[in-house]
Amino acid sequence: MKSPPSLEDLIGIEYSKLGFFREAQEKIAQLHASTLELERRRQQIQAILDGITDVMAVITPEGRITSVNRVFYEVFGGSSPIGRACYNVFRGSDRFCDPCPATIAYETNRLCRQEHILTLQNKTRHFEITASPLRDPQGRPCHILLLKRDVTLEREYQAKLNHAEKMSAVGLLAAGVAHEINNPLTAILGFVQAIRKRLPEVRDRLPQEFRSTLEEYTEIITDECARCQEIVQGLLSFSRPYTGATTAVDLNQCVQETVRLVRHRFREFPGLQYAQELDAKLPPIQGEPSQIKQLLLNLLLNALDALPNGHGAVRVRTFVRNDHEVCLEVQDTGCGIERESLGKIFAPFFTTKPVGRGTGMGLSMCYSIAQAHNASIEVESEPHKGSTFRVVFGLMP
Amino acid sequence: MDITKFSIPEIIFGRGALKYAGLCAKRLGAEKPMVVSDPGLREAGWVSRLFDVLAGEGMEWCYFEDVVSNPRDFQVAHGALFYAQHQADVIIALGGGSPMDAAKGIAVVVGNGGSIHDYEGANRIHRPLPPMVFLPSTAGSGSDISQFAIITDTRRRLKMTIVSRTLVPNISIIDPNILTTKPRHLVLAAAVDALAHAIESYVSIIASPFTELQSLKAIEMISIYLPLAAREPSLEILEALSIASTAAGMAFSNASLGADHALAHSLGGTFDILHGEVHSVLLPAVMRYNLEAALPKMAQIGRILTGKNIRHERKAAEAGIQSLENLFASLEMKHRLRDVVPDASHLPELCRMAASDACLLTNPRSATWMDLLKICEEVW
């Protein structure tokens, strides 16, 4: 039961007409606090959005841009795109793209991915576009979020990797072919040698001229067969899978065998002066011969490619340095390497060669081979003068 | 003298003051006020006049007239719902005590939630109310001035008294023009109510010089203009009654009332009698009951009512009461309780209810329910 009112209640000195002042003060304080909190959250979300490295844009179903992130300005530059049509801003077109990922996402209420190649500031850029519908509280799409990721580098790497894989398949094929050729070659050689063995028996019965011609021909066949065998052996030794087993390796022999393999390419360079200085007293090193030959092959091919118009000198040297370092050096007088590229030459897929010529894998492979041998690669290069690649092995333990 | 308090709303008084209703509401922040009135005033054209004023200020409004004489608790609840549905702001009441008290009840529920029963008693309202602009259409209830609201509890069949300084409206706009369309008997009933306010607040035990001044002025003016109004309610006379009623309102809002109103509230709650009609029956009897306890003041009232400078206090007081009875008789007002209440069997229960009414607190002579019953039986 409520207590009955008293006289003091009726006089009500302590009670006044209640105003909204305090309520308003409290509301203002609450609003202020919630505004601060909202601002803090907004900044947090903005930081997250700014942290996204993709171009981000929110567009209406009609294709009008309502907001973009910081990266947009970095990639597309220029003035604010707010209110402009997306196809105009992104592709400089005056009508919707066909197919339009945003429209598909809006109509299906599902994520839509697309790739698009675009020329921006004279550079071809490859974009992966993701359009996802932004839904209202009822789950109906009301806006579309566009994410554009620059995948130019990834796509380039992908292409190079594909090429390298193709090349390695060709190499494998070559090894198989070499193996197949080896048998008939042995037969040819065997029969030629048999002919040459039988030749003295019939020598007297043959006309002089025919006999000397036959002798000369069979000798040529023998020599050429031997050459074929060397090449086949070389190819086979390259394709032999890396076992990890190391032996004592004579670097000079590696050089000779590798040079034999690329000698045919020397003929493509009429202006080439090839020289080799091999230290006859070179101590052996611990290693895997096929790997070292691969390393040297790559360095040699690079040296040849560096020669402008095929003119210049290439020199291969082996020598001992500081009594405990065994060096294998390939020097050319080619185009050299630009200073800014010098740091990147061992990175996979880095290449300065024209498209289709280099995979960007050569030096990277050299680097990993050297690492496996506890060797280091020293590079000295000056643009337009030439480069020197020096692989430094340790002595055999 | 004890520490006292005197509070009244802003008062705008004068013929045609209605035209300031829109401006006043706007000053209080109105964009869409809720207008509370009754069918009578609508039919008389005052509601549409008010709408014109609001439209002149470029305001929208919503209109609520589900109000009857002795406003009910459920009507207050409906009104509060209506206010919320229409997203109204300022509450404008145009009418007599009923629409104004209903508007107060609606304002309480709108500003504080719950039901109006939660606020019965004194100073139970703890949150601000929407701004209120009141335009009284009677010279009597004083609700446009007072800190009281009387709402009928339909379940308990009694009138709840709600007391709070925050029930004083922000602005009271008193336009005597509005009184001109009132039926004669309502004008008279209201004036008698105002007279009862003036007399009871004058003898109240918490009356102060500030309220006494207003009470005496009101008694004097009503005793002069009530008979005149009965003959020819001219605008001048209605204006005078408005001034008197406003003065009485200022007095009773701050000094409260007495036994007459305590009984009137319980009668009105039980039988739905027009509030102004019970005073002609009860007021003289209550004055007699109080006579000894407030003799000097009763004598003062007697001198004013009779217009004679009677020296002897008791004689003056008694002459005053007699003069009052004569006045009521000349106005052909009811003077026996049996003319008002259908059946005497309810009287004890009714008096028990009145004994707990807040108005009885300030009666100059304390009264038990038995005392009240005796008064009722006297006038049966």
Image (cartoon, coloured by chain):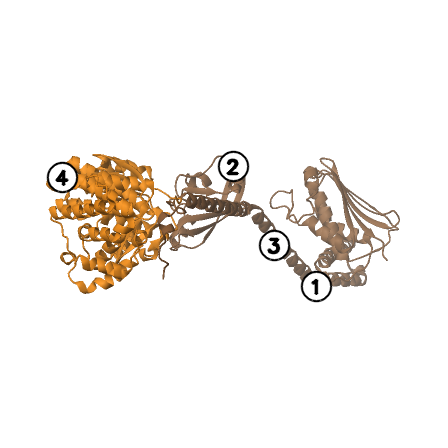
Chain colours: A brown, B orange
Q: Which residue is mark 4?
A: B228
For mark 2, give the secondary structure.
Answer: loop
Q: Position of residue B308 (x, y in %)?
A: 19, 39
User: In 3D space, how far apart are the residues under numbered discs 1 and 3 (Cα atoms)?
Assistant: 27 Å
For mark 1, give the secondary structure.
Answer: helix
- The answer to whether tags 1 and 2 share a subunit is yes
Q: Is residue B128 left or right of residue A78?
A: left
Which quadrant, please, contains the C terminus of chain A?
bottom right
The answer to whether the residue labelled 3 contacts the one labelled 4, judged by CB atoms less than 8 Å apart, is no
Front tag of 1 and 3: 3
Q: Position of residue B236 (x, y in %)?
A: 17, 35
Q: Mark 1 Cα within 10 Å, few/some/many (few <14, many 20+)?
A: few
Front tag of 4 and 1: 4
Q: Nearer the viewer, residue A111 or A312?
A: A111
Subunit ID for the residue under disc 1 = A
Q: Which residue is mark 3?
A: A166
Q: Amino acid at mark 1?
A: Asn
The answer to whether the residue labelled 1 contacts the one labelled 3, judged by CB atoms less than 8 Å apart, is no
Q: Position of residue B207 (x, y in %)?
A: 32, 45
Q: Quadrant of residue B307?
A: top left
Q: Residue at x 70, y 38 (%)?
A: A339
Q: Which residue is mark 1?
A: A183
Q: Amino acid at mark 4?
A: Leu
Subunit ID for the residue under disc 4 = B
Which badge, 1 or 3, comes first in the chain's sequence? 3
Which badge, 3 or 2, comes first in the chain's sequence? 2
- The answer to whether tags 3 and 2 share a subunit is yes
